[in-house]
Image: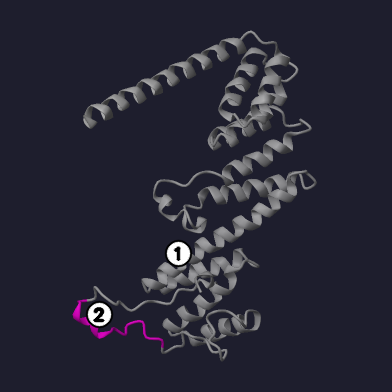
């Protein structure tokens, strides 16, 4: 009996969903047809209403219709600006970037062209990570940073061109965050190389942080990593030089113990294996390289 009841409920639910879909499609078709009869002003007002309601998908469609029907109308240029925003809020970052670039190309002297420049940077900033990067959604620094680098360059160009823009302060704040993400990304890669005992590669990554991202929180971790790598490479002079810089500038860094001594001295044994590790042929209790990331402490 229960089998037939469940079957009946399933059929009823399927019918209801199909009806909703049909009515929904019918409503959309009617709205699309109604839009074709509106005047330019009425269509633009509908767009504003859709944006206010955060119906960004419909706003995009109506903005496209507005431009196709009235390419030289009163609201033509404004609608080209607003579709950038609508695409961005509809999670269509690539379309937002393309629309921003188109507006910049066609209306270089427009009084609000700075907005298009700003939105181009913002859309790059918000580009979603690739498939592999989804494993690292808790930490943007572990993702592919190509879009972050592009965003930084776009914001930099925007600020150079429009330093007094209404959007300049927000762009500067985002650049600081991107700088932090890029520095952390370099440090994550450097720590990976330390784990692999590829010390020269780790040193190069740490130097990139120090040279290109001065002032970021990752600088201290990069210095601590340099000290360790130079010690492992048996370059005591370079190790001591960077240790002094670290101690003078970041005396409370996590690489120092409670007595102010560097935790990972020249005698730090990366190759020391426990009995469990030897008996399990290296599968269990493997010796761990230090991780130079003060966020994890």
In the picture, residue 181 is in which quadrant?
bottom right
One can see residue 182 in this view: yes
Q: Where does label 1 land, which residue?
A: 189
| Numbered range of the magenta stretch | 268-281
Instruction: Provide the secondary structure element on which disc 2 rests.
Output: helix
Q: Is residue 144 above or below residue 51?
A: below
Residue drawn at the location 49% of the way across and 69% of the way down: 204
Q: Position of residue 73 (x, y in %)?
A: 72, 15
Residue drawn at the location 23% of the way across and 31% of the way down: 2
Q: Where does label 2 land, which residue?
A: 277
Q: Position of residue 92 (x, y in %)?
A: 54, 34
Q: Position of residue 201 (x, y in %)?
A: 44, 69
- Residue sitting farthest toward the bottom: 259
- Residue sitting farthest toward the top: 37
CB contact under 8 Å: marks 2 and 1: no
Let me know if residue 251 is in the magenta part.
no
Q: Is residue 49 left or right of residue 137?
A: right
CA distance separating discs 2 and 1 = 26 Å
Camera-side mark, 2 or 1: 2
Precedes in sequence: disc 2 or disc 1: 1
Instruction: Provide the secondary structure element on which disc 1 rests.
Output: helix
In the picture, residue 111 is in which quadrant?
top right
Q: Is residue 229 left or right of residue 212?
A: left
Q: Main secondary structure of the magenta part?
A: loop
Let me know if residue 272 is in the magenta part.
yes
Depth check: give the residue in front, 266 or 27: 27
Q: Is residue 16 above or below residue 165?
A: above
Q: Position of residue 205 (x, y in %)?
A: 49, 67
């Amino acid at each position: 009996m229960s089998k037939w009841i469940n079957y009946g409920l399933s059929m009823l639910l399927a019918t209801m969903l199909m009806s909703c879909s049909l009515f929904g499609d019918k409503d959309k078709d009617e709205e699309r047809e109604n839009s074709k009869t509106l005047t330019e002003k009425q269509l633009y007002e509908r767009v504003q209403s859709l944006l206010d309601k955060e119906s960004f998908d419909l706003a995009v469609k109506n903005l496209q219709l507005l431009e196709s029907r009235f390419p030289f109308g009163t609201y033509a240029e404004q609608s080209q600006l607003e579709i950038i925003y609508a695409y961005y809020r509809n999670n269509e970052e690539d379309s937002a970037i393309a629309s921003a670039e188109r507006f910049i190309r066609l209306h270089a002297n427009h009084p609000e062209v700075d907005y298009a420049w700003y939105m181009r940077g913002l859309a790059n900033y918000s580009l979603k990570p690739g498939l592999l990067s989804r494993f690292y959604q808790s930490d943007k620094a572990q993702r592919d940073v190509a879009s972050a680098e592009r965003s930084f360059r776009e914001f930099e160009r925007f600020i150079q061109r429009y330093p007094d823009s209404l959007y300049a302060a927000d762009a500067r704040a985002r650049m600081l965050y991107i700088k932090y993400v890029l520095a952390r990304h370099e440090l994550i890669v450097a720590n990976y190389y330390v784990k692999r005992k590829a010390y020269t590669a780790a040193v190069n990554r740490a130097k990139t942080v120090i040279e290109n991202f001065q002032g970021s929180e990752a600088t201290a971790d990069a210095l601590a990593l340099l000290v360790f790598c130079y010690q492992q490479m048996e370059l005591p002079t370079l190790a001591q030089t960077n240790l002094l810089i670290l101690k003078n500038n970041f005396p409370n860094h996590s690489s120092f113990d409670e007595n102010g001594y560097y935790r990972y001295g020249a005698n730090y044994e990366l190759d020391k294996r426990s009995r469990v590790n030897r008996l399990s042929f290296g599968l269990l209790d493997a010796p761990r390289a230090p991780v130079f990331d003060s966020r994890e402490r």
